[in-house]
Amino acid sequence: MKRIAAILVLAVILAGGAIALAAQPVDTHTPKDVIGKNGMVAAAHPLASAAGIEILKAGGNAIDAAVATGLALNMVEPNASGIGGGGFMVIRFAKTGEVAVIDYREMAPGASTKDMYASEQSSKERWTIEGGKSVGIPGTVAGYFTAIDKFGTKTFKELAEPAIKLGEEGFEVSEMLAGIIKDNYAKMAKYNEPENVPYFDEYGLPLEKGTTLKNPKLAKVFKELGEKGPSAFYTGWVADAIVDSIQKAGGIMTKEDLTKYVAKMRTPVTGTYRGYEIVSVPPPSSGGTHIIQMLNCLEYYDVKAMGHNSLAFMHTFAEIMKLTFADRTAYMRDTDFGYVPIKGLMDKGYAKTMVNQISPDKIIASPKAGDPAKYESGSTTSFVVVDQEGNICCVTQTINYFFGSGVMATGAGFMLNDEMDDFSTNPASVSAPEPYKRPLSSMSPTIVLKDGKPFVALGTPGATRIFPSIVQTLVNIIDHGMGMDEAIEEPRFWSNGPSIEEPRFWSNGPSVFAYEDRIDPALIDQIEKLGHKPKKYTSYDAYFGAVQGILFDQATGTMYGGADSRRLGEAIGF
Amino acid sequence: MRRYTLLVLLAALALAIMGGTGIANAANPLLITNVGQGAESAMVNVLCKKNGIAATLNDTATAGELAGPDGKAKFSFMAVVVGYSGKGMGAAGVNIDQELARAHEVMKKAQALKLPIIIMHVGGVERRGDSSDRLIKEVFKYANHAIFVSTGNYPDSGALDKKKPDNLLTNSLPKGVAPKIVDRINDVVAPLKGIMGL
């Protein structure tokens, strides 16, 4: 009897504990790897990850699931990407080990000129950032159809079903999305009639947390794409809506421009870091090249012995970033429009010339671009999908700033990009706009191999923080032995040398050192003493990106998914 | 003849009344400007459009933009939407000192032009905090009229029912200015129309 009473008491205590635990707010920042054996999707919104998983479970491959995830993101994370934008997709095929890169980056309209943003009026009226002049020719639809046609197993119609359901039935607006809608309300209200913006309520005001967001107009476009293919986007009423909306907002894009868009197959850039093979995106993204360049530099240091986010590491990596950004400004552009010394930039000997400039006790006041030619012999979302066969599809895509240009294709339910902002406003720059040129990107979905087998696949948004954040995450895993989500959640920092407020203008000015405030303030004091200019960000700040990644245990075949709490990321495996 | 005289007198009286309330600028009845660069000025502008109030939105209006070539006010009323947004300030390329300097200049000019100032704080408790409070303390004194969302009178965004309002908004107004207090931003149209005599 005593025993039964004791069990009852214990049960009550345990039940009480469970209730108490359930009542605790969930700490989204605590590292939590999601485990899977048969397939996994790590995306910036749980409903998007679920859409990809639905396709994998229905027999689709990683490419199919990636397209479904991307389309769902257009519904549930409309601020960051969608069919009004562009991106890059890196695919590794398990059977052959081959890697394909699909470049569906936007292109400049045909009437673009090198000096189109050089005027004071352009700067004052923010032509590169909002309104019709900021919009590049969208590439996402062409990219998705290229992926499906070449490598997929299902039709667009099948892959769009989860997204169409989200658009028609709606989903609950999160606190984060409500805040982003409010932050970007002014530009959306400026360029659109309120009733055409699905992110506004019946009064024309921003949707609030807890309300339901539906987007039946975008669902209708997805249905038409399923029936008619990409021509439903690049010609016809959707094309009319795109061009009319852009031109009403002061833009120069024409219907002919839309018909000229092509997605391109690219050869990936590859390098090594401590025996791991790095495979990433080539120009027009600068990201992959610079990831390899920075890892080459770090290979000259005993990063593990330096200590995680130690003074020595933060100073050294900040200096590497500054030198890398100097090269980015000097050399990086669309390779269809000029030569880029990619091999030189990724050469380990060239990295040595960078490392030789770095002093342990002071900053480089005026970092200059190097001469890599001597060694010749780069508001977004990112997601990773792995299927049962082991194929990997790693995607980063964007409409640039949150809610892009602020211009919606009227009646079509999607926001158009402001990717023209990624061109230089300086007409003399290698990255000045030209007709049908692709703007320079930092997007760098990346796959890392060990002994020829997948080790980790990852990507992140975050503009020019993208490739430094990927390098920091890789260092956390490779040098410090962290798990996937742990490596993602660790505090990050960033420096590119010029003014943080206007990073496009290389000023050789004092080094701004941007950091998350979880980094020890005493170390930040010492960083400042070395000459860096610290700028504090919040503890888990989306400024530093939002890495989604999958780590592979080669011995057991288990996958460990991590998704960044700096946004609403969630990995789902099965 | 008497009839015509009466009509002329009535017309003159109507014009005088309209001039007194600013309705003389019927084409430009309302300028909406912003102090703190929050998104609420754009929201007020959309509410005006949807409810038939002709308005001009100029978030960074300067003193020089208030008068026409004749030196008279171009508008009948000026709504000043107050609330600090770091992102908005960054986008406008100004810091809080520059924003306040512009605010003081534009409101002093409005007073000189006898352009009635409607202070609006419609972002509620989200537009409270050190920076917003500084703006409130410095610019509310210029108000001829005021419209608030009620939660703006609370000091921070903790559980509102457990906190006492500090009534900063109400207490920062000049004596004699009684605020119109509404529950939500979409309720501001009726008091705004009332103030404007529409």
Image: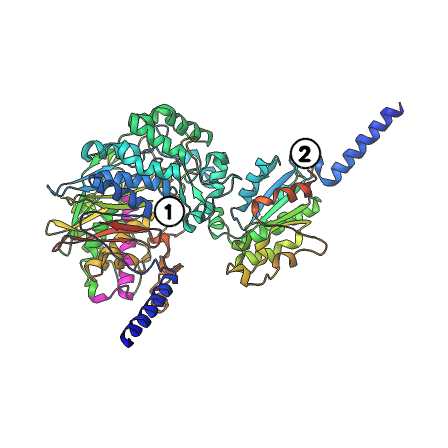
Report which residue position mark 1 lands on. Answer: A505
Chain assignment, label 1 = A
Q: Mark on residue A116?
A: none
Q: Residue at x 83, y 28 (%)?
A: B8
Task: Quarter of the image for the N terminus of chain B: give it.
Answer: top right
Q: Position of residue B89 (x, y in %)?
A: 49, 50
Q: Are marks 2 and 1 on the same chain?
A: no
Is residue A330 covered in magenta? yes
> What residue type is disc 2 on?
Ala
Q: Which quarter of the figure has residue A483?
A: bottom left
Report which residue position mark 2 lands on. Answer: B26
Q: Where is residue A515 in the image (x, y as percent from the top left)?
A: 35, 59
Dot 1: few (<14), some (14–19), or many (≥20) neighbours within 10 Å?
some
Q: Is residue A500 visible?
A: yes
**Residue segment shown in magenta:** A305-331
Residue that lies at the very extreme toward the front in this rendered image: A1
